[in-house]
Image (tube, coloured by chain):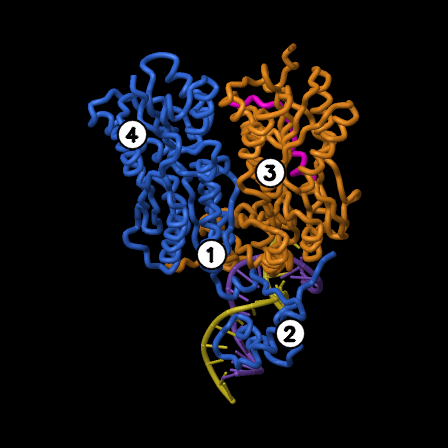
Chain colours: A orange, B blue, C purple, D yellow
Amino acid sequence: MKRTFATLEDVARAVNMSRAQVSRALRGDPGVREQTRELIKAMAHQLNYQPNLAARSLAESRSATVGLIIGELSNPFHVTQAQAVDEELVQQGYEPAVSLRPINDSSATAEAERLLRLRASAVILLATPHSSEAIVEVARHLPTVYIGSTPAWHRQLATVATDDTGGVRQAMEHLLRLGHRRIAHIGGGPEASAADRTACYLAMMHDAGLEPRVISGAHDAISGWKGVGTLFSSGPRPTAILASNDIIAFGALDRLKSMGLSVPEDVSIVGFDDIPDAASELFSLSTIRQDIGMQAALAVKMAKSLISGHPPTPDRQTIPLRLVLRRSVAPPRAD
Amino acid sequence: MKRTFATLEDVARAVNMSRAQVSRALRGDPGVREQTRELIKAMAHQLNYQPNLAARSLAESRSATVGLIIGELSNPFHVTQAQAVDEELVQQGYEPAVSLRPINDSSATAEAERLLRLRASAVILLATPHSSEAIVEVARHLPTVYIGSTPAWHRQLATVATDDTGGVRQAMEHLLRLGHRRIAHIGGGPEASAADRTACYLAMMHDAGLEPRVISGAHDAISGWKGVGTLFSSGPRPTAILASNDIIAFGALDRLKSMGLSVPEDVSIVGFDDIPDAASELFSLSTIRQDIGMQAALAVKMAKSLISGHPPTPDRQTIPLRLVLRRSVAPPRAD
DNA sequence: CTGAAAGCGCTAACAG
DNA sequence: CTGTTAGCGCTTTCAG
């Protein structure tokens, strides 16, 4: 079953021309008579010619491959982000090399070396690895764009950061303006994004002269579920909950419903990320939207600069966020 | 910033030997003195040598690349499946080329050609594309393993099928044995897997002399949510619901809770797939487990046969399913 | 066990 | 506009 492919040589012979000319014609190089190009293209098609990308990158001694490493595949936000970056990469003529293997601080080097073997010209890191050291370690190997909240610097590294603080601020201001006073927060794990959100929540509560209430968990549904359990089992009941991400919010929403509480009448709730399901009738979750398309476009643009050897300036850009209001938020019940 | 890499030549020169021998040593070819190999390896490491995979596959005129195309990235089941296949592929020495772009019947050819350019030696299709024609179309291009329920045949195609019927049968038998009589079904879309599940449900209800009740939707949460709305707004209330997959079940569960109904006291519910969240406290969903590891291993094994030119026999194997009982199922309330 | 030589399929630099 | 000539970095005979 070993198939053999048509080569440039085959096409060249068939049209009685040189390999070089065929190559030029097929790649859209200007120096080819239009008529010739048509002929060549037709023959290539007829012979079922597909360029051998390995040969090409060997000859060009560079490759269009850009690695794409995804944080948590179990997090729909990361998956959506990955799709956006992938699409942008393809659009810009790159060949994404996606890795589904979870990468942690210690496997980062191994993954980078894998990309080196593929002669990837850059890598885009989605919210992973967690530590700045590990991020820098990757950047030491090849041009790197990191999308996430962890601060890290290296001459071969550019960062697309999320304005976690600005996002939380918008959400909190809205809740406060509506009259909420007992606002609780269910936080994510130790990653920078979660930590930043929690820190901003605390600061805002403090500034408003209110008593903060933080439940810490991870960026998953069960944390939201448990968090609500804890929040409503003792102490004053919150009238609003700020979740560190949408998944937590979903878990929280679920628990509230099974406790017979309704949203937003009894409790308002705000998430973070605006993942696809947030807009669904099922949740109709107010949340802080991350503009994934903008992130992706910026990340690829930065990768391009890095590849060309001109690190982008600034090497860290922050994408603004905005609050999207849906049915999960209302003024507190007058009581 | 154009980095240049150490080549085999560089290492060879450094140890005063030929490229050929260095190549052999590094790849673990037997014909090398152990001491020499050590020396070479050390030098390669010191020079930070990373083999150029493009050059290798060009020289070998074959590549270790295997494409992996994922059905719906928004479906956690598919994502988990993809990770399992990816891991198995790596374990077997292949280089997965994952595609995040959604593939439909018409883009199938384009995607196959992309893989051809990469000289991928095979492709693994996860529940996509939907039609047998499109699946066969891919197989016409390169050795293909399809994991899913759509029946399709081609000499270069092997299938890992799910025993949808067996799975539904187990679930239904269990519900019937517990005494449920009003069992409703919320179905998925037109794909083969969903259709097979629905067909089996209908057959089982018929055999038991019971009145079937089918709500059709898609394999997403909102379908479950809406389905429950419909089921409980008119007609006799079901005591059990068989969902075509776990996501539908989650949506259903959610709606039931907000309607003040409790699971399993008021309604039992069974899903399909056993995605990671099903086991969570949050849902504790009884479901039909697909053994993802077994699927992945079989798929890669089949790919291997196909690549070596010996199509596996049989070319379609079915993975058995089993019912996993959790808290979402109980006997019907005596009324 | 080791080396020399011949490509794999493509692009690039230089002539016409 | 088109052809010729060199490689890109690696594996693979085929000789020693």
Q: Which residue is mark 4?
A: B175
Give x and y (percent) for residue B179: 26, 26
User: Amino acid type of disc 3?
Assistant: Ala
Q: Which residue is mark 2?
A: B43
Marks 1 and 4 belong to one chain: no
Front tag of 1 and 3: 3
Element type at mark 4: helix
Q: Is residue A291 magenta?
A: yes
User: Amino acid type of disc 2?
Assistant: Met
Q: Which mark is residue A218?
A: 3
Marks 3 and 4 belong to one chain: no
Report how far apart the C-alphas of labels 1 and 4 lie in the structure: 58 Å
The residue lying toward the viewer, choosing from A89 and A211, is A211
Marks 4 and 2 belong to one chain: yes
- Chain ID at mark 2: B
User: Amino acid type of disc 4?
Assistant: Leu
| Quadrant (top left/top right/bottom left/bottom right) for the C terminus of chain B | top left
